[in-house]
Amino acid sequence: MTATDPWPPPQYHAEVTSTNDLALQLALRGAPEGSAVQAGRQTAGRGRFGREWFSPADAGLYLSVVARPDRAPRSWSLLTLAAGVAAAEAIERTTGLRCDLKWPNDLLIDGKKFCGILTEMNAEATRVRHIVIGIGINVNHASFPTELQTIATSLRLASGKELSRVELCAALLKSLDREYRALLEKSDARESVLKRFQERSSSVRDRQVYVEAENGGYEGMTYGLDPRGFLQVRTLQGLRIVLSSSVHLR
Ligand code: BTN
């Protein structure tokens, strides 16, 4: 995952609890940057806020990659957005389908989610030990459990055809590598991620949203991203910055 290292193929497992769990364990044991884990099925696939990620056998792409940036934790808040842009570009190139990014970690087609990103970090106050970027894509799912039917889709349902997870995985790793390397090496990479994320998102601006918060949440209108990649929402009380809450589109 760096300019000099070769691009290692992912370690494949037929079944794991969660590829993020496995990648975090590998990273703790010293796995090098760019180490990737892919699974045919996850028995405890998870998303943000401890939500379950539906991970049936041989239908989805379940992938986690280890990064070891040598910068302060603060500057890595943008990595989830960069991974989203990388996933959207890889999927569009491979399938021709247009993806809509929903801040901070969802990819949608026709308003339904088919891809989610879970970035987990092991850090000290001023140093990142490692980051695991976990990406789940609903690729060849033909149907979903009742509770997901109105909110989830797959690339197969959207395109009407089965897709190669191998091809998709290769395109995704390449695209992730490019975005990550740019963030490490190019001074304008952060602006570029913010720009492309906003261009690819129909909801990051001028969209009525409900933001979950501990004190009950609030309604507002999205107002783009701030320079750190946080979502800005205009409310009757003024501009609010969303750091990590759930944002529901209205
Ligand atoms: C979300 O939508 O909240 C994020 C979902 C992330 C799911 C992926 S699947 C591969 C990796 N392993 C996990 O347990 N989660 C991520």
Image: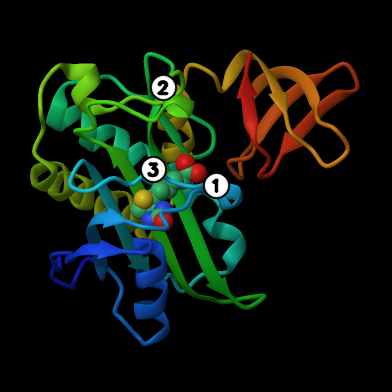
**Mark 1 CB lies closer than 8 A to ligand 1:** yes
Q: Nearer the viewer, residue 189 or 101?
A: 101
Marks 2 and 3: in contact by CB < 8 Å?
no
SS of the residue under disc 3:
loop
| Left or right: 176 in relation to 244 | left
Element type where label 1 sits in the image = loop
Image position of 49 with respect to 224: above or below: below
Q: Amino acid at mark 3?
A: Phe
> In the image shown, does 152 or 207 lie closer to the viewer?
152
Question: Mark number for residue 54?
Answer: 3
Distance (Cα) linking label 3 and label 2: 12 Å
The disc labelled 2 sits on which kind of residue? Gln
- For disc 2, the marked residue is 149
Q: Label 2: few (<14), some or many (≥20) within 10 Å? A: few
Q: Mark 1 — residue?
A: 51
Q: x, y percentage for residue 228?
A: 61, 45
> Horizontal and vertical percent for residue 105?
48, 40
Q: Is the residue under label 2 in contact with that under label 1 (CB below 8 Å)?
A: no
Amino acid, disc 1: Arg
Q: CA distance from mark 1 to mark 2?
A: 16 Å
